[in-house]
Amino acid sequence: MPDSSTGSTGNTESAQTAENTVDPVNAGSTGSAARPSRRAVLAATTAVTTVLAAGATAHAAGTSGVPSAPSAPASPDDRKLRALVSRMTLEEKVGQLFVMRVYGHSATEPDQADIDANLKEIGVRTAAELLEKYRVGGIIYFTWAHNTRDPHQIASLSNGIQKASLGLPRGLPVLISTDQEHGIVARVGAPATLFPGAMAVGAGGSRSDARDLGRIAGRELRALGIRQDYAPVADVNVNPANPVIGVRSFGSEPQAVARLVAAEVAGFQRSGVAATAKHFPGHGDTAVDSHTGFPVITHSREQWERLDAPPFRAAIAAGIDSIMTAHLMVPALDDSDDPATLSRPILTGILREELGYDGVVVTDSLGMEGVRTKYGDDRVPVLALKAGVDQLLNPPSLDVAWNAVLKAVRDGELTEARLDESILRVLRLKAKLGLFKDPYASPDGVDRRVGTRAHRAAADRIAERTTTLLVNEDRVLPLSRRRQPKLLVVGADPASPSGTTGPPTGVLAGALNELGFTATALSTGTAPSAATIDRAVAAAREADAVVVGTYNVTASSSQRTLVERLLATGRPVVAVAIRNPYDVAHLPAVPAFLATYSWTDVELRAAARVIAGRVEPRGTLPVPVQRADDPAAVLYPVGHGLRY
């Protein structure tokens, strides 16, 4: 198994980006910068290059604090990185282990509300101050932290972060990350290209599509200065009641999930972005959300090997750059009652020693309840490092976590050599991603690579292969513009994952209008009231057919009442599950039922084309749907999917 943290950069765009990086003098601004020169890039990275060169001399003199790997001599580049580690202060080493959130659209001039949020939660005003105070090795972007307004702003923020970090004594490039899974979890929105989510890709079943998704998504993220993506989800969703994974998973069949995980990893990493398989050792069979509770996986060791392990093995075989831990307990793998994030038997014993993985291990967010249930926020980061973690993601209090690690080293609970081991892995990844040579994003690169017509067309083609037709009695679908020209679109309108698409009813109605129908949208929500249902029924009587978007329907959901009342009008009703395909089990009387697995525009537009008969429904279920009245019985098996 090749060491995924060493070797070539994997950057297919390095020849292009080297000539088009941002002038570090203007990198902190939020507007469009003038076309920068290669000289500017070289000037910006001179400090790091000098340190690396000096570090090589220091290493030759035997001053490195990191022991050489016994299996093979260190490469020249590795020797430079080891020397760089040896020159760091202890405080700088501790900082390199953390990946932290920060509020604001700019590294130096965020809005006042974001300054206030930073002061309250982190004790600094800006990203630049965060880097100066704590020397963090990574920063994670969130929509809610106002990091991702638009592509040029994101690139400018990334450049401001790199400029601030590289301008510090012994400054290092920052590994900027985000959760861009696509589907229901996406931090970067339109005009960047948004793809179907994992379960939709699982319904398509194409490794080529998964690889293309990763390649294009990675290409766009890299253009924004984001070099680490917390995707793909490698969890096998065998529990329909899973409240946190669900459609974020490729499906319920371990080998099918493994194939798609490996393909998406290859796509991302060929674009020069580190993929992250999550959540090890597997989060697919939980009934508790680890954000708010402490899940327990009751799989035996044999079940874990058969159900949960295959996608992670496939990711490692594909050369995955990073793996994220899960905040859950697996007694069959470690009976200490500790979450996997803090489990040395799981992270070192299984992941590193048994599976042979030597890349970066990153925790899931340390602010989640699943990792805070048993220990305090000062103990969690120390125990995670002792377990084998390399990157500590988003602690609730950076000051508490940072000082706890510092104290643990000074008190002898953690050795400095243990820190060096993780820092070296992180630096290897930064070097592989080209951050020491070319840390900046280019405005020209944003225009050439983000949300291009070709990328959007690829997303549309992939989405068309995922829409799944589960029911089509009496050939209700496709609808006809001649027989049913006037349509009503009702249903749930959940907020866009990225804040830049939707609402679903409006997107569906708009797409159907473009296809020649006259469609009207009426949002009825996830829990329509009696008055709302009455309005929808009255509108349905004026339409030729009704399209209703459903969202996580349950036995007691008023969405069921809405659908039943719409059916009673005698109009043809087409239900579209815009999240979980399991909705169909609660709506047995619906004559036509489609699953899209998410409500982002690309999937809804594809569903509209299927409804209008412009394209064939080609998806098949990647998970089984159980009967609502007998969960032990399967209503629709894996692989079910109708055609016209």
Image (cartoon, rainbow, N blue to C red):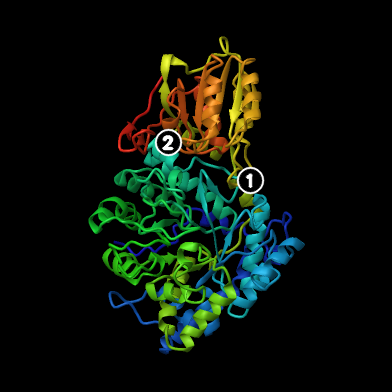
Callout 2–callout 1 Cβ contact below 8 Å: no
Q: Secondary structure at mark 2?
A: helix
Nearer to the camera, 456 or 389: 389
Nearer to the camera, 84 or 126: 126
**Picture quarter with the N terminus:** bottom left
Q: Residue furthest right?
A: 112
Mark with earlier residue (2, 1): 1
Q: Residue at x 29, y 69 (%)?
A: 349
Q: Residue at x 37, y 41 (%)?
A: 207
Nearer to the camera, 583 or 155: 583
Q: Is residue 370 left or right of residue 395?
A: left
Distance between mark 2 and mark 1 Cα atoms: 25 Å
Residue 252 location in percent, x, y?
34, 43
Residue 642 location in percent, x, y?
38, 24
Which residue carries the number 2 mark? 582
Q: Secondary structure at mark 1?
A: loop
Q: Residue at x 51, y 39 (%)?
A: 598
Q: Is residue 3 visible?
A: yes
Crowding near pointer 2: few (<14 within 10 Å), some, many (20+)? many
Q: Is residue 361 left or right of residue 23?
A: left
Crowding near pointer 1: few (<14 within 10 Å), some, many (20+)? some
Q: Is residue 325 visible?
A: no
Q: Is residue 452 above or below residue 409?
A: above
Looking at numbered disc 1 in the image, what kind of residue is underneath it?
Gly
The number of discs equals: 2
Residue 351 location in percent, x, y?
32, 64
Q: Nearer the viewer, mark 2 or mark 1?
A: 2
Q: Is residue 54 left or right of residue 532?
A: left
As drawn, the label of residue 112 is: none
Looking at numbered disc 2 in the image, what kind of residue is underneath it?
Tyr
As drawn, the label of residue 499 is: 1
**Picture quarter with the C terminus:** top left
